[in-house]
Image (spheres, rainbow, N blue to C red):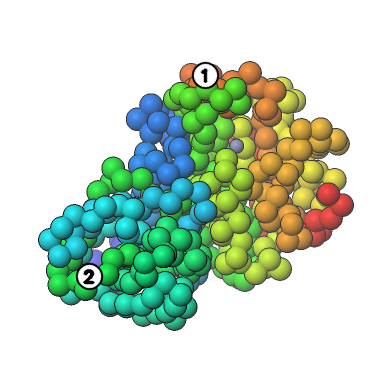
Amino acid sequence: MTVKIYLPLFALGILTALKGLSQTANDTINKESVKKMITYLASDELKGRVNYSKEQLEAAEFINKEFSSFGLEPFPGFENFYQPFRTSFGGKTAMVDVKWNDKKLNDSLYYFFSRSLSVPALELSDFLILRTTSQLADSILYYNWNKTDNILLQIVLDDTTHFSEAINNIKAPGGMPASNILIVGVKEEPVSLKVIPNKNLVTSVLYNVIGIIPGRSLPHEAIIFSAHYDHVNKGLDGQDGLFNGANDDASGTTAVLELAKYFSMRKDNERTIIFCLFAGEELGLLGSQAFINYVNSESIKAVINIEMIGIANIEGKNTFMLTGSGYSSLYKILKRNLKGDDVKIAGQYSDPQYLFRRSDNYTFAQEGIPAHTIMGSDDSEPCYHKPCDDVQRIDIENMTKFIKAIAKSASTLISGKDTPTRIKGF
Ligand SMILES: [Zn+2]
């Protein structure tokens, strides 16, 4: 009996495993899926995924869901796929209403740092309560911030210090908090407290979304695929509007998601693959700068950042460009792996627009990591940072080809066969 029951299950297991191994890019990366993903990311509903907007958080939640469905794992030491980071831009509170002793607190008097985007409703008994003066607030939080799920840091302000100053002096947590942290600047001791999620409140915290597939035999060596999922809400002429950022960089975001799906189906990566979708790029590469503190740069063997591959205006259809191609041997490796393919890779031999320095690859390059950006178009594209950067202009077919080619070109990096030289000369 048992044999009869177990045999088919066992056979099924083998079939699934074989299917996983023989899975080609053609099966998983396809036009329909690419179109669906980029159409959502660049939809009016997400209003351009602007930094500090609730729509950007919705985009992050979408990426989070995709990562979960592919079976990715969180980055080691992180609780989940989100990496929140505080920026010095904007001083607004985040995502919750606070009732202190039955009175609603003005949102200039508190700051909420959530470790995840699903914020729970909380009350006083849920918190470890720390009360201190403004001078000691930073160090007291620093020594306690991973002790419990929820921390309430009450800063008892003296008459000369404003809460905004006190909060600016708090450095921790700079990256991944293990706790939800509520910082409040009031004198009155708390008798009752209610923290109520309110997604309409903008946050001064941005969220990278990071997932990994651990390597089979070289888990301590990693290849990064990255893109930024944020976009601008102002044109170069200062004009406000709805900028959907389809090419910049919903296209790169879609590529990273498709690659995550593809490699998680194959599951044959010898090196660890890290998929990074950064926020804050348009504010000056803030997301990658927040993330790089968590990696040992020696262990990162290559970074392939992906920008604006939805339109091919640099080299024409079927060819993408690698920025800074002379600074490491990554270009030669990718080119060799694409031999015979429809899609070609072009080098970049001068950089009058400073493209190499203007995307998240640059953060990694500064640490000596061979980190470059694959681009289909540059800022001479007529809708670059303009409201007309819409999904209707995206060449889905060509973009799908590009994503498949990126997977193919990186194959010997993923298998551990090739290691590019460390970057230099830029
Ligand atoms: Zn961009």
Q: Viewed as shown, does residue 245 lie left or right of 411?
A: left
Depth order, front residue of 98/54: 98
Against 292, is 125 above or below? below
The answer to whether residue 413 is seen in the rendering is no
Residue occupying the point 63% across, 18% down: 382
Cα gap from disc 1 to disc 2, whole angstroms: 52 Å
Q: Viewed as shown, does residue 219 lie left or right of 74?
A: right
Residue 61: % across, % down: 36, 47
Residue 41: % across, % down: 43, 34
Disc 1: CA contacts within 10 A as few (<14), some (14-19) or many (>=20): some
Q: Amino acid at mark 2?
A: Glu
The residue pinned by badge 1 equals 388
Disc 1 + disc 2, Cβ < 8 Å: no
Which of the 4 image quarters holds residue 216? bottom right
Q: Quick one: label 1 or label 2, which is nearer the N terminus?
A: 2
Q: Which mark is residue 188?
A: 2
Residue occupying the point 59% across, 70% down: 219
Disc 2: CA contacts within 10 A as few (<14), some (14-19) or many (>=20): few
